Amino acid sequence: MGLWQLNADTLARSRFVLSPFAETFAALKLLHLGVAAHPGEQVWLREHLPSYRRLLAADPVTGLLLRAGLGRAWIADFLSPTPRDREPFEAAVARVRAVPPADARANLTVSLPGPLPAALERDDLPERAARVLEYVWEETVRPSWERRRRVLEADVVARTAQVSQGGWAAVVDALRPGRTRWLGENRLQVNLHEYPPREISGAELVFVPVTPKSGWVSWEEPDRYAIVYSCSGALADRAAHAAPASLGALLGPARAGVLTLLGSPMSTSQLTAVTGQALGSVGRHLRVLLDAGLVERRRAGRSVLYSRTAAGEVVVKAAGL
């Protein structure tokens, strides 16, 4: 397994960072895979996958570059520079464009299972990678960035509240279940790959949420390390949150939709971002559900998280969910 060794101070100083570039790279990975993890991704892929495939069909070299760089076991490092706090997309993609061509080719030999194809023995690979990332940003991410950002911010609020309750170790275990784990004795498991441990004590460690079902690690040795993970409030289409008609008839469609989302704790800001309802509307629905005993709330640090009660679970299950 991949292990990072770090002292308690390094973990205590770690923080969450939002990155439009990481969100764009996660979207590129989703387009490359072409397989949705939930209905919201299915809708997104139906809208954007055909034009993405036409783009690569017209540019076979870039298509080959992405197939080589987005390997199953390892991502070519130059494609995913380590996120930096408050870095605009344009600044991050400029870092991709500035990678020396020899370094890009060397990165590809790591992500590929075999030798580098002759068609990739060229010096414009960083420029080609930057151009396709700019396309994904402009055409598929930027138009919905504000909504994505609200979902990501809500995830950070909830995770930060978890830190105040269970410490960083509990949060790390939940970031990428089965992949990230705090093993004790200053050991952080970051993936399931068999690589030598890395000593990162004293470096900057950041956790970066993205809305697609994706995740990876990156670093700029020896100063900066990042774990990118899929946030808890997935950017699903709003139709995917529609409650069964019977539950909607009982509670009202919007209120029933809020109840169905609360199978795991969420804050009001998360519910607002995911449902698209106004903050005041979400607050009124939560008040009614609280008074009815169908949801409960608890304070976690500066945040308030809501989840279904046992009675709420019975109601949702009776409706067929």
Image (cartoon, rainbow, N blue to C red):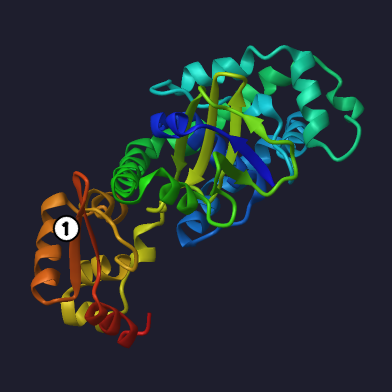
Q: Which residue is drawn at 71% across and 31% down?
A: 76
- Residue 90 visible within the image: yes
Q: Which residue is drawn at 42% across and 21% down?
A: 88
The mark tally for this picture is 1
x, y percentage for residue 28? Answer: 59, 39
Report helix, strand or loop for mark 1. Answer: helix
Can you identify the residue that label 1 sits on? Answer: 282
Decide: is 153 above or below 109. below
Looking at this rendering, what residue extends furthest in the bottom direction? 318
Residue 186, by quadrant, is top right
- Residue 231 visible within the image: no
Q: Which residue is drawn at 31% across and 65% down?
A: 261
Pick the front one: 111 or 47: 111
Kind of residue sitting beneath label 1: Val
Q: In which quarter of the image is the C terminus?
A: bottom left
x, y percentage for residue 175? Answer: 48, 49
x, y percentage for residue 249? Answer: 20, 81
Pick the front one: 33 or 49: 33
Q: How crowded is mark 1: few (under 14 residues within 10 Å), some or many (20 or more)?
A: some
Pick the front one: 285 or 223: 223
Decide: is 294 above or below 14. below
x, y percentage for residue 75? Answer: 69, 36
Decide: is 204 above or below 231. above
Residue 256, by quadrant, is bottom left
